[in-house]
Amino acid sequence: MTNHSIASLVEDFELLDDWEDRYRYIIELGRSLSPLAEADHTDQNKVQGCASQVWIRTDIVQGADGAPVLHFTGDSDAIIVRGLIAVVFALYDNKPARFIAETDAVPELRKLGLDEHLSPQRSNGLKSMIARMQADARRALQG
């Protein structure tokens, strides 16, 4: 996937006039996700609490300072959800575990206006993805 930051996504969203265009952009982000190997579509990687099927694989590497850094790959059976995975990855992928564990994604994602334009089911699924990634970060910190 091309690396996006939340700041660059906010800038891109501001250039798009309506939510139809923003939804298309989110779908394109999902299409740019690195593929998740079929072998990683496991119960262990499945995110609970999502209406769609969502899998997130977490790989932990050691950062330059010796602290754990998390890399995520993910997939969903729903194209818009793949895009939402890409949005969350823009915030958390390849970041130190401490940052992930301590950064509340909700205010960051609110900058995109997602909270006002997602169904309650999609919002709950997004929160489940975030909770899962933060739990993985906390586990990595406990080492």
Image (tube, rainbow, N blue to C red):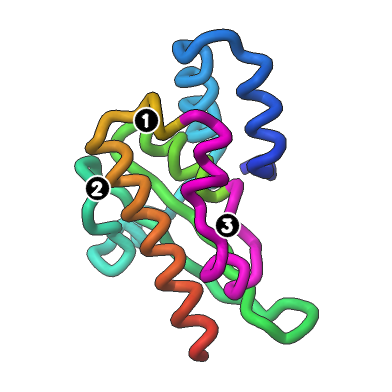
Where, by quadrant of the figure, is residue 56 drawn?
bottom left
State which region is magenta. 90-113
Between 27 and 113, the residue placed more toward the observer is 113
**What label does residue 79 carry, if any?**
1
Secondary structure found at label 2:
loop
Q: Amino acid at mark 1?
A: Ile
Where, by quadrant of the figure, is residue 1 drawn?
top right
- Looking at the image, is mark 1 or mark 2 earlier in the sequence? 2
Question: Is 137 included in the stretch rendered in magenta?
Answer: no
Check disc 3 and report the residue beneath it.
Answer: 92
Residue at 45 percent across and 44 percent down: it is: 85
Residue at 64 percent across and 33 percent down: it is: 9
Q: Amino acid at mark 3?
A: Tyr
Check disc 2 and report the residue beneath it.
Answer: 50
Local crowd at mark 1 within 10 Å, few (<14), some, or many (≥20)?
some
Q: Amino acid at mark 2?
A: Cys
State how far apart marks 1 and 2 are (Cα).
Answer: 14 Å
- Looking at the image, is mark 3 or mark 2 earlier in the sequence? 2
Secondary structure found at label 1:
helix
Majority SS type along the magenta span: helix
In this rendering, position of residue 20 left or right of residue 1: left
Q: Indicate whether 124 appears above or below 80.
A: below
State how far apart marks 3 and 2 are (Cα).
Answer: 19 Å
